[in-house]
Amino acid sequence: MKFVRRLYQRFSSLVHELAKFGSIGAIAFLIDLGLLNLCNVVLDQGPLTSKVAATSVSTTFAYFGNRFWTFRHREQSGLGREYFLFFLLNGIALLFGMLTIGFTTYTLGLHDPLSVNIANIIGVGLGTLFRYWSYRKWVFLEATEPIPMELPEAGIRQDR
């Protein structure tokens, strides 16, 4: 049991970070999947156009969830810089989805919604591995000094 406890203590911040990343990712995935099907099946926009639209919306949600919850303990290097890098890296990750959907639809000739959704799930899975690694490396940097868990009370007046 001591070994397990030491292992948990050593990796607890990573475990918590992964759990938060997974939670935000799961919600973003549901947004992506719902919008992909809405655009592709209901609005008949085509699978690749639908994927781009769905990813744009789900990426925006994921940025704010990851910045202000998953990686809030990390250095904040500027909203503009982070948002740009986040979308750039998500654009690269989007290629995984585009390639799997494009291959399924145009190479294999499978145009049905189930095939598109399976291809999307595979693409999202591959893209997720890339995104987690790249967010930690380039977007949400390690804090150079400890970031307080609560905001300081100094300077706040309450006239009541």
Image: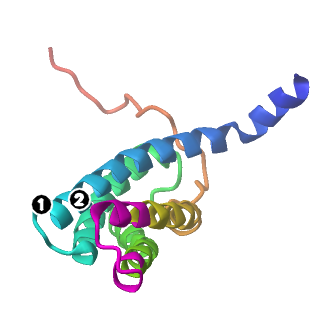
Near mark 1 (Cα within 10 A), the count class, few <14, some 14-19 or many ≥20, is few
Q: Quadrant of the N terminus?
A: top right
Give residue 37's mark: 2
Q: Quadrant of the C terminus?
A: top left
Give residue 61's mark: none
Q: Which residues are magenta?
A: 104-119
Q: Residue at x 34, y 59 (%)?
A: 114
Classify residue 71 as left or right of residue 86: right
What SS does tag 2 mark? helix
Can you give x and y, in whole percent of width and height, for residue 5 in the image? 81, 27
Can you give x and y, in whole percent of width and height, for residue 148 in the image? 51, 37
Q: Disc 1 designates what residue? A: 42
Can you give x and y, in whole percent of width and height, for residue 25 in the image? 43, 50
Amino acid residing under circle 1:
Val
| Residue that extends furthest to the top in the rendered view of this protein | 160
Q: Is residue 44 above or below residue 24?
A: below
Q: Residue at x 38, y 70 (%)?
A: 81
Near mark 2 (Cα within 10 A), the count class, few <14, some 14-19 or many ≥20, is many
Q: Is residue 24 visible?
A: yes
Q: Residue at x 25, y 62 (%)?
A: 36
| Residue that extends furthest to the bottom in the rendered view of this protein | 107
Between 5 and 160, the one nearer to me in the picture: 5
Amino acid residing under circle 2:
Asn
What SS does tag 1 mark? helix
Q: Is residue 78 visible?
A: no
**Circles 2 and 1: CB distance less than 8 Å?**
yes
Q: Residue 63 lies in what quarter of the image?
A: bottom left
Q: Gap in Å between the C-alphas at discs 2 and 1?
A: 7 Å
Q: Residue at x 41, y 70 (%)?
A: 90
